[in-house]
Structure formats: structure tokens, C-alpha cells
Image (cartoon, helix red, strand yellow):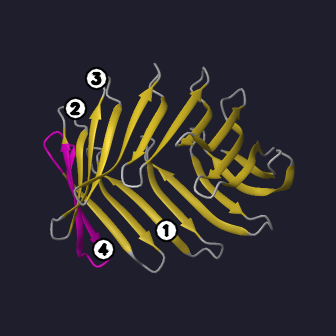
Amino acid sequence: MDKWITTKIELDASKNEINRYHFKSFTVDSNGNTLDETEYDSESIVVCKRIYRYHDTGEVKEYVEYDPYDELLERHYYHKNAHGDFDRHEFEFSGGQKSIKEFSFIDIGNADKATIKDENGMITGYEVYVLNEQGQPIEEIELDSDNNEISKYEKSYLESGELQYEKLYQDGQLFNGESFEYDSKGNVIKKIHRNYIDNFEVIDEYTFDSNNNMIYNSSHQNGVLVFENKCSYDNNNRLISEEFFELDFWERRIVRHEKLIHELET
């Protein structure tokens, strides 16, 4: 296991450093999975703690977040059945509230319906999945406890299997849509998000190096740069620095401009 420290450097509009502090400590296993992390504010006071556990196949098994006093904020647990399929998701929050999602399966083992219950076992809703021949969901429908439709996703795929487009309907009305473009290695290099209710468009673009590390990501809303992230890696492809820029499109003000330095503890 490796232990890392993240330093946050806050920058002004001219990229001059205005503050620097210990932002996060975290532990990573030999597979590059984060096992635990503690986040701090600018006064070195703990903000929250997170713990991650994984299935043998690499997917997240459990995620738990605590407040500074070790009181539960939220817990996510993803259970698999004997066939290796996810058949139960549990979400627990402070105060004891829970949302439990249980999946049913068709013959080939793909989820086609989920029943959602609260901490008392009362049904609060359903999710229905319509699958194509490859087992990919082409429709995801959210229903309330009376089987009334709340929202619906429609999805289409490229011949190579990657998601090409998805539309979200709410109360029967087209709410937004997203389209995706990929490079030859299957990395998403462009995502176009269109909001049909508020009439705006966000274009995300991604750049990768020869080792498939994302080195640049930008977002433009209606042609205005609203987010930017520049990343660099060491010779072992470990992320060692990120520089963020974020703008509030509606208020035209900088929300954050900061740099994160990730260092391996010796």
C-alpha cells in the first residue's frame, strides 16, 4: 500500500499563489484503488473521512463517508450474487434513512427490473430496463410506487459497443440529451450535453497521452469556457498534479482556481 498527501494551492486570476494547505491524505492499494482518505479544510480541521472496499473483480463493494466526529454521513454497499451479478444496492444516510435496490434477472443474467424500498421495507419505486441483444440497456425507466413513470433514459450504441447517445425524459418531456465521441482506444474525447428545458449546451472535451492518462479536460457552456483541468503523471502513470479552473456561467465569476499536488509519502 502507498500513502499519499494532497496539497491544495489556491490561485488568483493571474495564477499567483494566495494560499496553500494540506487538503487530503489517502491510501492506495497495489491495483491503484483508493482504500481510505481524509479531507481537511484550510485550517487543517478534518472535513470528512471516506473508506472504500472492492470486489475481487475490481468493482467498488462498499463506500462509507463519515463526518469529522466519525458519525455516518452515507454508506453505499453493492452486493453480488453467486453468478457475479450485482443484485442489491444499499444506500444508508445519517439519521438511519435507507434506500435498498433489489434487482431481478432474465435468463442470461442481466437486470431487467429493480424494486426500491426504504429502511422499513416499504416499496418507494421501481426501475425497469429494456435491453438489446448484447444485454445493454436501451431504455431505463424510473417509476414511483404506483408504477407511474417519473423519468426515462433512451440510449443508443456504436457497433463497437460504446454508448453513442442518450436522451432523458421527465414527465414525458424531453429534458436533455448527451452524445459521445471516442478515440481508437475507446476513451471518451468529446461529450455534448444539451438541455432542452433551459436551452443551453455544454461541450466537454478530453485529451489523453500515449498511456491513456487523461491530461486535459475542458467544458464550454454556450461557447464560454466554464471548466478546465490540466493533469500530469509520474513515470509510473500515477497522477501527481491537477490544475482546476471553474467559472459560474450565469454570474460570470470564478468559482475556483486551484492546483492539487499529490505526493507519495516516504
Q: Please state which of residues 74 and 137 is positioned toward the viewer in this rendering.
A: 137
Q: Position of residue 16 (x, y in %)?
A: 86, 47
Mark 3 near mark 2, Cβ–Cβ under 8 Å? no
Please tell me how crowded label 1 is: few (under 14), some (14-19), or many (20+) other residues with Cα within 10 Å.
Answer: some
Q: Which badge, 1 or 3, comes first in the chain's sequence?
A: 1
Element at label 1:
strand
- Give the CA distance from mark 3 to mark 2: 11 Å
Q: Which residue is mark 1?
A: 74
- The answer to whether residue 189 is visible is yes
- Give the CA distance from mark 2 to mark 4: 32 Å
Residue pictured at 78% horizontal, 46% vertical = 265
Element at label 3:
loop
Main structural element of the magenta stretch: helix, strand or loop? strand
In this rendering, would 41 be left or right of 101?
right
In the rendered image, which quarter contains the C terminus?
A: top right
- Give the CA distance from mark 2 to mark 1: 34 Å
- Give the CA distance from mark 1 to mark 3: 38 Å
Q: Which badge, 3 or 4, comes first in the chain's sequence?
A: 4
- Kind of residue sitting beneath label 2: Gln
Figure quadrant of residue 1: top right
Q: Which badge, 2 or 1, comes first in the chain's sequence?
A: 1
Q: Which residues are magenta?
A: 105-130
Q: Please state which of residues 180 and 107 is positioned toward the viewer in this rendering.
A: 180
| In the depicted structure, whether residue 164 falls above or below residue 222 | above
Q: Which badge, 3 or 2, comes first in the chain's sequence?
A: 2
Q: Position of residue 195 (x, y in %)?
A: 40, 49
- Kind of residue sitting beneath label 4: Asp
Q: Position of residue 204 (x, y in %)?
A: 52, 38
Q: Which residue is mark 3?
A: 159
Please tell me how crowded label 3 is: few (under 14), some (14-19), or many (20+) other residues with Cα within 10 Å.
Answer: few
Q: Which residue is mark 2?
A: 134
- Kind of residue sitting beneath label 3: Glu
